[in-house]
Amino acid sequence: MPPRKVVTGRSQEPRRRYAEELRRLRLAKGLTLRELAALVGWDASLFGKLETGSSLGSPDVAEALDQFYGTPGLLLAMWEMAIGDPTAFKEKYRRYIALEAEAACLWHFGVSVLPGLLQTDAYAAEVLALGGYKGKELEEQVAARTGRRMLLAGDDAPPFRAIIAEAVLRTPLRDAAAWREQLEYLLEMSERRNITLQVLPSCAGLHGLVSTAVMFMRLQNGITVAYAENAYRGELVEESAAVEALQRAYDAMRDQALSPAESRKFILRMLEEVPCDPESST
């Protein structure tokens, strides 16, 4: 049997391939990192990290580079493949992330933290740091998580409903300015036509999802699957009876949640309680 022909000497690992392609495109234009940074608008050190593979950056950077190099969609697609690589997400989340990206409709309940699709960079960083991430790995996980926000942008974004337990909104970040930014971001997202936010008040009492966060995903084939998660583990739920039981609990909870308009007022009240000057809270 003849030896297998090597089509390219470039890496077949998505993360490394993305880094190599960024470097190849820059060198093809004869640019230094500093010159690229001046033209595109990000810091030269970021582009250096991207080209060494020490960081994946964000989808915004990939899109900007696509526009600059005249490669519409290529770098963004490579970035998406890179964040699906085991080096960016733990194996147990990979299928969930893929299903989330392709879902026709999404609805979520947050029992202890905000859904990842609605987290600011600062919020994601604090939550992920509690899970043990730090340094470069933390930066990469934050970029990967917040990059998923793109799912809710654009004319073809799927409908997304999020029910947020009151306790989530009464658990601020350590940094008051960052917490203010997060609440403002929630209000901004609640104004989008495809996003519905509701707050479940504590007075609603115990409910069927009292210790479980869950994301439901209606797939293009009409089947609904769920991803249920607590502080220690997450599980993709595909068996129809189990998904239906979770949906019944979700629907019962939605009946007790504040309306979208009342929920916006609730978040506004939470925002008013955040000191404008972080030092004033000490």
Image (cartoon, rainbow, N blue to C red):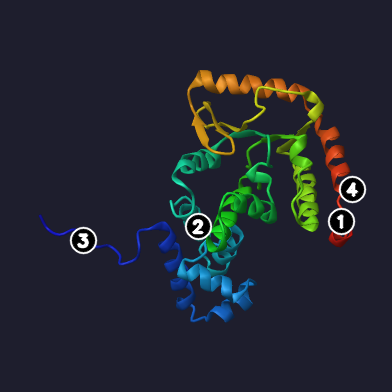
> Residue 281 — which label?
1
Residue in the foreground of this view, choosing between 4 and 226:
226
Badge 3: few (under 14), some or many (20 or more) residues near its Cα, within 10 Å? few
Looking at this view, name the residue that lies furthest to the left.
1
Secondary structure beneath label 4: helix
Q: Distance between the residues labelled 2 and 4?
A: 38 Å
> Residue 107 — which label?
none
Q: How far apart are marks 3 and 4 (CA)?
A: 65 Å
Q: Is 207 located above or below residue 10 in the figure?
A: above
Residue in the foreground of this view, choosing between 169 and 75:
169
Q: Which residue in the structure is indicated by mark 3? A: 5
Q: Which residue in the structure is indicated by mark 2? A: 79
Q: Mark 3, mark 4: which one is toward the viewer?
A: 4
Residue pictured at 47% horizontal, 57% vertical? 78
Q: Where is residue 120 in the image (x, y as percent from the top left)?
A: 69, 52
Residue pictured at 60% horizontal, 55% vertical? 142
Badge 4: few (under 14), some or many (20 or more) residues near its Cα, within 10 Å? few
Q: Mark 2, mark 4: which one is toward the viewer?
A: 4
Instruction: Choose top left, top right, bottom left or bottom right for residue 34.
Output: bottom right
Please name the amino acid that badge 4 sits on: Glu
Q: Distance between the residues labelled 1 and 4?
A: 13 Å
Looking at this view, name the residue that lies furthest to the front.
282
Q: Mark 1, mark 3: which one is toward the viewer?
A: 1
Residue 113 left/right relative to 59: right
Q: Mark 1, mark 2: which one is toward the viewer?
A: 1
Q: Which residue in the structure is indicated by mark 4? A: 272
Q: Return the disc, 1 or 3, that comes first in the chain's sequence.
A: 3
